[in-house]
Image (cartoon, coloured by chain):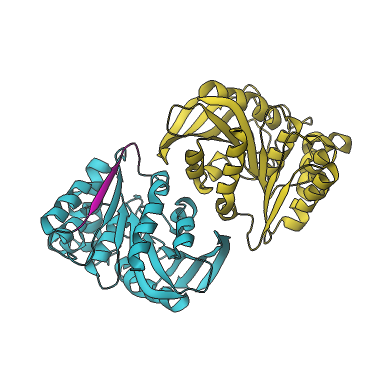
Chain colours: A cyan, B yellow
Amino acid sequence: METIKSHIVYGGTLRYLKHDSATTGTSMTLSVFVPAGEGPFPVLIWLSGLTCTEDNFTTKAGAYKAAAKHGVIIVAPDTSPRGEGVADDPAYDMGQGAGFYIDATQAPWTPHFRMESYVVGELIALIDAGFPTTGTRSVFGHSMGGHGALTLALRHPELFRSVSAFAPISSPTRCPWGEKAFSAYLGADRAAWAGHDAALLIEGGAATGVYDDILVDQGEADPFLVEQLKPELLKAAAEKAGQGLTLRMQPGYDHSYFFMASFVDDHVAFHATRLKA
Amino acid sequence: METIKSHIVYGGTLRYLKHDSATTGTSMTLSVFVPAGEGPFPVLIWLSGLTCTEDNFTTKAGAYKAAAKHGVIIVAPDTSPRGEGVADDPAYDMGQGAGFYIDATQAPWTPHFRMESYVVGELIALIDAGFPTTGTRSVFGHSMGGHGALTLALRHPELFRSVSAFAPISSPTRCPWGEKAFSAYLGADRAAWAGHDAALLIEGGAATGVYDDILVDQGEADPFLVEQLKPELLKAAAEKAGQGLTLRMQPGYDHSYFFMASFVDDHVAFHATRLKA
């Protein structure tokens, strides 16, 4: 891993890093915050939303104060492979910046678009090898990255201690963003989609008994709430499956990092409690 | 004032605004955070550094949690007039984005570059007229904006209750950034410069007895520390004049918003205490 730049923040060290990924076949970028001290520290992985790189969360979320306080490493990867030779689409919700944390099975997205394998395999290994971690980790994210956090945690419960999300795409098989992305990346056969739909996974009991609670914050003034995000589907699925899930509808809040910054301390504390249990 | 966009953050309302300025003869942009509740609230004005707009502080400083807690309005104006017909320079440290919070006396910077008059006159009046303020205010800033905060507070002590700075240009008459900007905006005659040099103003007793303390944070790993910022000149001037000044050298910190975010709570608290005294 190559360090692009490094900053001290809240007494810890924040690095922007780049590495050649065997999983995506591209150079991948990320940021890693490590608290002051020797460690070892548990790891909290952040997955960003559409159009984001690793930089949006890193500069705007205001999460490092809580991470420093609780002694948690925070890792924020980019949202897709990028660069020349990597497939792309002019739309903001497809291609580079829109990896959806799944492994594409359809051309032209194969072989680079393998964000699920990248996060749960190479990224986790890289962090555990390169930083003073306890080997335990949790995951959270926003919008497309909220979908990513939920589905990766539900599909790989052995890897994570806890999961939370801000304004997640709750059921990508039942909203335009998800239907468009899954059609392109996974193909027209909807049978392949269900395993990447957080609400359907919860309803199917994918992680019942694994996660005591799943924390979800959703702004009531979020312009994507009704058509794209549909947190009520998560809540209904959790009730049906007996999965603990706390959905907090936040009056007045929108889809921006200002919303996330307002509640990020709660999420870091939620994970810190479970990472240290 | 026209509202460009609005977000709820930490329960308060953050607005990006635009208005036609009689002082600069241009459209000017700013952000205003107003805490939840009826108010009235005291005002804390933030002045940004070179290349910034109102957006850098607003998205990166993480100041609104403390502002919400203490019940303080935070106003962040742009750093210069902008637009077609406004003089500019290809260098990052001159022209648009580099107003230096002074009123230019030299062509081509007259008549638009009047950032001192804009901040202490039109901006303050606009905020007091448009928001539930107590009519009391303080000022802080970063780098060029640290110079701005210090010099405006020292030149107009009747307007402000307190002043603080992150990595300020402490003595623009004795560093390349300041010498270049003052030569261009104020002309070759250095006699006109001294009144806009924070260290010289403090040394001359400009506000001795007005401000009980001036808080300055400076990163020891700031690449501009030795050549441009020179906080030791502030400290020496304050000691000479009997002006209270707390200079905190912060080991490892650089010139970025990560540095400022790490200590911004202290600054908001410093001002809140004095605004409510």
Measured as percent of width and height from the top left, residue A125 is found at 38, 76
Whether residue B30 is in magenta: the answer is: no
Of residue B154 and residue B18, the one placed in the foreground of this image is: B154
Q: Quadrant of residue B203?
A: top right
Specify the farthest residue to the front: B277
Measured as percent of width and height from the top left, residue B158 is found at 71, 27
Magenta-drawn segment: A244-254
- Left/right placement of residue A172 relative to residue B74 reads left
- Left/right placement of residue A238 relative to residue B203 reads left
Q: The C terminus of chain A lies in which quarter of the figure?
A: bottom left
Of residue A166 and residue A227, the one placed in the foreground of this image is: A166
Measured as percent of width and height from the top left, residue A180 is found at 23, 52
Of residue B1 and residue A272, the one placed in the foreground of this image is: A272
- Left/right placement of residue A256 relative to residue B90 reads left
What residue is shown at x 71% (from left), y 56% (from top)?
A: B224
- Left/right placement of residue A176 relative to residue B145 reads left
